[in-house]
Amino acid sequence: MDASRLSVKIGNAEFSAEGPESAVNSQYERWLAAVAAQMAAAAVAPPPPPAAPVVAPQNQAQNPAKGADPAAAGGNGAQGAANELLARIFRAHEDGSVSLLARPASVGESILLAIYGYTKLRGQGTVTTVTLMKGLRATGVAVMRIDRELGALEGPEITRAGFKRGTRYGLTNQGIKHAEELMQALLG
């Protein structure tokens, strides 16, 4: 029998085989089915669209007490006030990161607020270490290792799953409450 050789690339998937034609064909059919299943799974669950950044009008962000209309700030009543508060504390960047415009005194509380910002602005229940570090760098917070900076906040207020660069941080109900109290305190 003649030896057959086949090399195919579809997206990031590559197939290469050499040998009897029947063996190459059977391997190719299995590979093709696996790639089709992988593409179908990716098409079923598209990534969520990035959330639009919440930005308050310039005059209201500087002096919200003078003529601030909560309905004009991005919603009605409490929702508009919440959006304005978020816009005064956080900045959502086009690359998906979230930085702080107002910083608390401790690095641990900055991390807590950053996780809260990702939760509210990006809809992410948990945030990876890499993503969190990117936002903190944009804020101007120098952190070598997040886990060492959290201290007593980790556990009762911040959840942690995974290890090394794949670690994901989230907030407990107590952490959400603390973050909201911090935001109120920062803005006076």
Image (cartoon, rainbow, N blue to C red):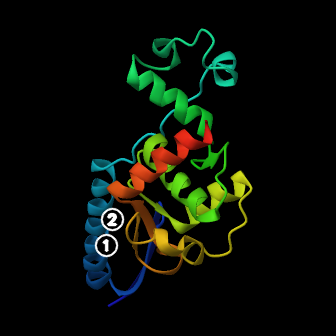
Q: Which residue is mark 2?
A: 35
Quadrant where the C terminus sits is top right
Horizontal side, residue 8 vs residue 38: left or right: right
Horizontal side, residue 156 vs residue 181: left or right: left
Residue closest to the far top:
67
Above or below — where is 79 with respect to 25? Answer: above
Q: Position of residue 22 (x, y in %)?
A: 26, 82
Q: Residue at x 54, y 76 (%)?
A: 147
**In the depicted view, which residue is nearer to us: 40 or 74?**
74
**In the depicted view, which residue is nearer to us: 104 or 6?**
104
Q: Secondary structure at mark 1?
A: helix
Q: Position of residue 160 (x, y in %)?
A: 41, 71
Horizontal side, residue 102 vs residue 178: left or right: right
Q: Which residue is mark 1?
A: 31
**In the depicted view, which residue is nearer to us: 131 or 63?**
63
User: Which label sits on residue 92?
Assistant: none
Q: Secondary structure at mark 2?
A: helix
Q: Position of residue 27 (x, y in %)?
A: 29, 79
Q: Residue at x 44, y 40 (%)?
A: 49
Disc 2 versus disc 1: distance between alpha carbons? 6 Å
Quadrant where the N terminus sits is bottom left
Callout 1, which amino acid?
Answer: Trp
Above or below — where is 99 with respect to 33? Answer: above
Q: Residue at x 52, y 18 (%)?
A: 73
Q: In which quarter of the view is residue 136 placed?
A: bottom right
Horizontal side, residue 35 vs residue 104: left or right: left
Q: Residue at x 58, y 78 (%)?
A: 148
Above or below — where is 12 with respect to 186? Answer: below
Residue 26 shows up from this direction: yes
**In the depicted view, which residue is nearer to us: 100 or 161?**
100
Q: Are marks 2 and 1 in contact (CB under 8 Å)?
A: yes
